[in-house]
Amino acid sequence: MLAIIGALPGDHCSAGDRAAAEAVTNYKVPVYLVQKSANNRYLIDQNNIPFMIVGDSPHSLIGRMSKSDAQFYMANRQRYGINTLWVELLCNNKTACNEDGTTFDGIAPFTTPGDISTPNPAYFQRVDDMLQLAAAHGIMLLLDAHETAGWLATFKANGPEKAAAFGRFVGNRYKDVPNFVWMYGNDFQTWADANDDAVVLAVARNIKSADPNHIHATKLNYPSSGSLDDARWDPIVDLDGAYTYYPTYAQVLKEYNRSNFRPVFTEGGNTRT
């Protein structure tokens, strides 16, 4: 989970649960895009209303769910006030999809396996469909354009030029889709290696160049990190992800107190409070 919601309303509700259910019922759907506030401390929607991420992390949604399954799932999440889903643009066995990156029904992300310069229109239509379904339920995606746990080796083998071209492709394709935030990384244990970092940065910089509309976040390493630990990402990151296997508040407070602060959210981990 990206944020803890608390008890979900059920058939036998306490007064507190009923109040929570009423709050969900009265919740006003944000007007996407989501952006940084003027003071750089929190997120706002297009009506300048503060936006709190209340999330779930179905990493494998694009790879493992049919449209009907996704419709059912998103309706359920919407019912409980979830407004954000962390989803991998490319998904393989490191995030519970097929090892070769194909969807459950056999659609490959690239027409030439392993060549990221050959995006498959059918696959990216599936991405389009999931974004549209999310929008219909008032849900924003944290759309991870370069999931590093499973895809770093593939992008390194392709090299920075093809990584940059991939960034331009997805940036141009999705720049006018309002209900998502760009994400990068995921257990990115080797970000301190300049060669590894350069490939992911090539994707991010070229997305940002092609798409001036969306904000960007990263998830770096476990057991504890913040997006701005990597100074090379400072010009790109708009939303600071706090990730920890230790008490959540400590990492969030560390990120909040940075001199170069951004809005902070917790990306999860084996959290204890």
Image: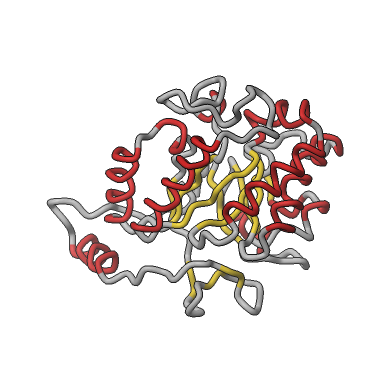
Residue 175 or residue 183, whichever sits in front? 175
**Residue 183 x/y as whole percent:** 61, 49
Q: Is residue 78 left or right of residue 92?
A: left
**Residue 192 x/y as whole percent:** 82, 39
Instruction: Please name the residue shown 52% across and 67% down the image.
Output: 33
Q: Which residue lies furthest to the right in this view?
A: 194
92 w.r.t. 76: above or below: above
Quadrant of the image occupied by residue 219:
top right
In this figure, what is the number of numbered marks? 0
**Residue 60 x/y as whole percent:** 47, 34
Q: Is residue 128 left or right of residue 214?
A: left
**Residue 173 x/y as whole percent:** 59, 52
Q: Which residue lies furthest to the top in this view?
A: 99
79 w.r.t. 67: above or below: below
Instruction: Please name the residue shown 31% across and 38% down the image.
Output: 69
Residue 43 or residue 132, whichever sits in front? 132
235 w.r.t. 59: above or below: below
Residue 81 or residue 71, whichever sits in front? 71
Q: How is the image coloured?
A: secondary structure
Instruction: Please name the residue shown 62% across and 72% down the image.
Output: 41
Residue 34 or residue 101, whichever sits in front? 101
